[in-house]
Image (cartoon, coloured by chain):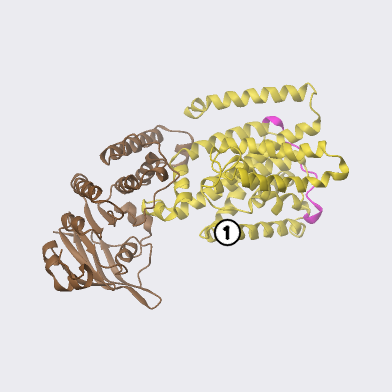
């Protein structure tokens, strides 16, 4: 069990955080709303870590990450509802199914589009994201259960602090281990110079596909957790703006930096939800003015992300 | 002598330009072949065709008796063809050590699961990769720079790192594109020593493109002269030095 031994510091840290959160929840210090947001932070971090693998580590620019998050959410919700698997014990299986579905779809569309680079790949993934959104909007034509543009209702609430915590911590450790293995090294080589990578024997097509599928797998699992937290899915939860959310978190936390993504996920969700509490309701929509301004400022002063040691232009 | 690399009637056109025009040559095992020619003669294109960064329009390339014309670049690397680049292509954000271990690890595989669960095999292969990289770091005089990002090394050391990275895949054939570019005479002298040692120690066959006559004449057993995508002549360094066509096409009027 080297896996557990080598990660014992992280696991202890995670356990500590869990105990603190559990106490806060149980002592009734934080409202139900805040509890839900806290769980949501872990879900967002997990999905954003997936994008970090794809973009931050491997350099594959994706503007369609929310689509895979949505595929995971709909897959798991559909399985639970149609098969009547509404017990916490079946949850690992349906989470996995959500993740695998997202990973498989990523693999299938990745084969043609991952040969594109930078902005072209961005446009292709953007297009795919829109396609998936349209699919969700019309999903009631395939199955009434999926709900189409009215939304997918009546999903069993299975996500708790415990499940989210265990799944997220486990997958973050798995991700960290892959990143520090030869696969992570090859991904970073590809990001740096694809031609040179091929010249030393890296099968760049396969490695890019692997990073993309794995990153989307993480998004799929996160989406499945989300479905069973909020018990209601709407196509608009998985549109372009959601993809941008994940992208912002990755850039905010620093490309190729998992710890940064965790902090950035916390700050980002906290900031948006915090403004909802702080701002009076008549100027609540001004959030969407503050946030872009913040991003512009960030790009000017810390283009490598808040958590990066690098400053300025390089 | 068995031919390690055989190139037959290789052709590549870019628009109307015949960059490589029916070129044939071979390199024997253990030999060092120098390719010279004026700028734009098609030398680097030949390298890019051999390593399949360009697709040849026609012709055939054989490596150790095997036709490799249509192998993708990564497979050629795994078969034992390594190259360095004219304009340096290091992994700039990776450390010196990571640049070398990545190359070693392409030939030493373990599964993703093995990586996730840190199995014994994973640990052993990672350790071997590090040891091998440390050996190459020492051999190429990069000691003490292991954790430096490749992009912040001085130029000469970047050149040596690129060589170390190429050697880390344990190549049989090494294609070197202008190793002496931008070097002063002292550095050229060091490079010459290094190249000789590298060839000896790693039992290599070398093809080298080079403009520095002192370097290419000293390292090569045989020299191929190109102009306008064609072979003008082929011979030993002393034959090439005396040849009138070569002097006209490349060396100018002054003999070297």
Q: Which residue appears at 82% of the width and 53% of the height?
A: A150
Image quadrant containing the C terminus of chain B: bottom left
Find residue B161 and report its horizontal and vertical position in percent: 33, 45
Find residue B56 and report its horizontal and vertical position in percent: 35, 69
Q: Could you tell whether B104 is left or right of B249 in the image?
A: right
Viewer-closest of B121 and A54 = A54
Camera sees residue A96: no
**In brown, which chain?**
B
Viewer-closest of A188 and A285 = A285
Answer above or below: position of B75 versus A291: below
Answer above or below: position of A284 versus B220: above
Mark 1, residue position? A119
Q: Could you tell whether A102 is left or right of B79 in the image?
A: right
Q: Colour of chain A?
A: yellow
Quadrant position of residue A44? top right
The rendered magenta stretch, by its main secondary structure, is classed as: loop
What is the total number of numbered labels drawn onto the structure image? 1
Few, some or many C-alpha atoms within 10 Å of disc 1 (few <14, some 14-19, many ≥20)?
A: few
The answer to if A156 sits in the magenta stretch is yes
Viewer-closest of A78 and A62 = A62
Find residue A224 and report its horizontal and vertical position in percent: 68, 43
Viewer-closest of B247 and B133 = B247
Q: Could you tell whether A9 is left or right of B237 in the image?
A: right
The answer to if A33 sits in the magenta stretch is no
Answer above or below: position of B38 versus A284: below
Q: Please, which chain is the residue tagged with disc 1 on?
A: A
Camera sees residue A64: yes
Q: Which residue appears at 36% of the width and 53% of the height?
A: B88
Find residue A271 and report its horizontal and vertical position in percent: 73, 38
Image quadrant containing the N terminus of chain B: bottom left
- Which residue is the extreme one toward the right? A282
State which region is magenta.
Answer: A148-162
């Amino acid at each position: 069990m080297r896996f557990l031994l080598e990660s014992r510091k992280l696991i202890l840290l995670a356990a500590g955080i869990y105990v603190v959160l559990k106490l806060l929840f149980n002592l009734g210090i934080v409202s139900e709303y805040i509890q839900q947001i806290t769980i949501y932070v872990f879900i967002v971090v997990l999905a954003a870590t997936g994008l970090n693998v794809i973009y931050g580590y491997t350099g594959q620019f994706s503007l369609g990450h929310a689509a895979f998050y949505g595929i995971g959410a709909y897959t798991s919700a559909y399985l639970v509802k149609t098969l009547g698997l509404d017990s916490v014990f079946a949850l690992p299986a349906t989470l996995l199914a959500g993740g695998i579905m997202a990973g498989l779809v990523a693999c299938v569309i990745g084969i043609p589009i991952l040969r594109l680079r930078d902005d072209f790949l961005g446009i292709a993934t953007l297009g795919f994201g829109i396609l998936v959104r349209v699919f969700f909007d019309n999903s009631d034509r395939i199955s009434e259960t999926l709900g189409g543009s009215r939304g997918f209702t009546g999903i069993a609430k299975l996500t708790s602090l415990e499940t989210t915590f265990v799944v997220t911590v486990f997958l973050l450790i798995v991700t960290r281990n892959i990143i520090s293995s030869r696969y992570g090294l090859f991904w970073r080589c590809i990001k740096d110079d694809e031609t040179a990578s091929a010249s030393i024997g890296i099968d760049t097509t396969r490695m890019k596909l692997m990073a993309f599928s794995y990153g989307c797998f993480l998004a799929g699992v996160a989406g499945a957790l989300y479905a069973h937290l909020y018990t209601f899915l709407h196509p608009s939860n998985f549109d372009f703006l959601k993809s941008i959310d994940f992208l912002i978190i990755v850039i905010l936390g620093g490309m190729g930096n998992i710890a940064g993504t965790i902090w950035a996920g916390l700050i980002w969700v906290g900031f948006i939800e915090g403004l909802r509490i702080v701002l009076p309701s008549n100027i609540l929509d001004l959030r969407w003015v503050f946030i872009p301004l913040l991003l512009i400022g960030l790009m000017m002063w810390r283009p490598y992300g808040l958590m990066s040691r690098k400053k300025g232009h390089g | 002598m068995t031919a390690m690399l055989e190139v037959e009637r290789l052709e590549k056109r870019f628009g109307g330009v015949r960059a490589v025009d029916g070129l044939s040559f071979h390199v024997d095992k253990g030999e060092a072949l120098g390719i010279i020619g004026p700028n734009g003669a098609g030398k680097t294109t030949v390298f890019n065709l051999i390593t399949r960064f360009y697709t040849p329009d026609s012709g055939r390339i054989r490596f150790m008796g095997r036709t490799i014309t249509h192998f993708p670049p990564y497979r050629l690397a795994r078969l034992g063809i390594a190259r360095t680049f004219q304009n340096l292509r290091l992994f700039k954000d990776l450390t010196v050590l990571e640049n070398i271990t990545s190359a070693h690890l392409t030939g030493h595989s373990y599964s993703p699961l093995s990586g996730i669960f840190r199995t014994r095999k994973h640990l052993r292969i990672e350790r071997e990769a590090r040891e091998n990289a440390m050996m190459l770091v020492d051999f190429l005089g990069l000691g003490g720079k292991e954790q430096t990002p490749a992009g912040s090394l001085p130029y000469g050391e970047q050149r040596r790192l690129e060589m170390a990275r190429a050697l880390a895949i344990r190549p049989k054939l090494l294609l070197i594109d202008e190793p002496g570019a931008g070097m002063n005479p002292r550095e050229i002298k060091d490079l010459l020593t290094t190249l000789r040692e590298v060839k000896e120690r790693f039992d290599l066959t070398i093809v080298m493109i080079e403009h520095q006559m002192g370097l290419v004449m000293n390292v090569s057993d045989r020299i191929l002269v190109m102009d306008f995508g064609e072979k003008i002549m082929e011979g030993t360094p002393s034959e090439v030095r005396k040849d009138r066509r070569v002097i006209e096409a490349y060396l100018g009027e002054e003999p070297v």
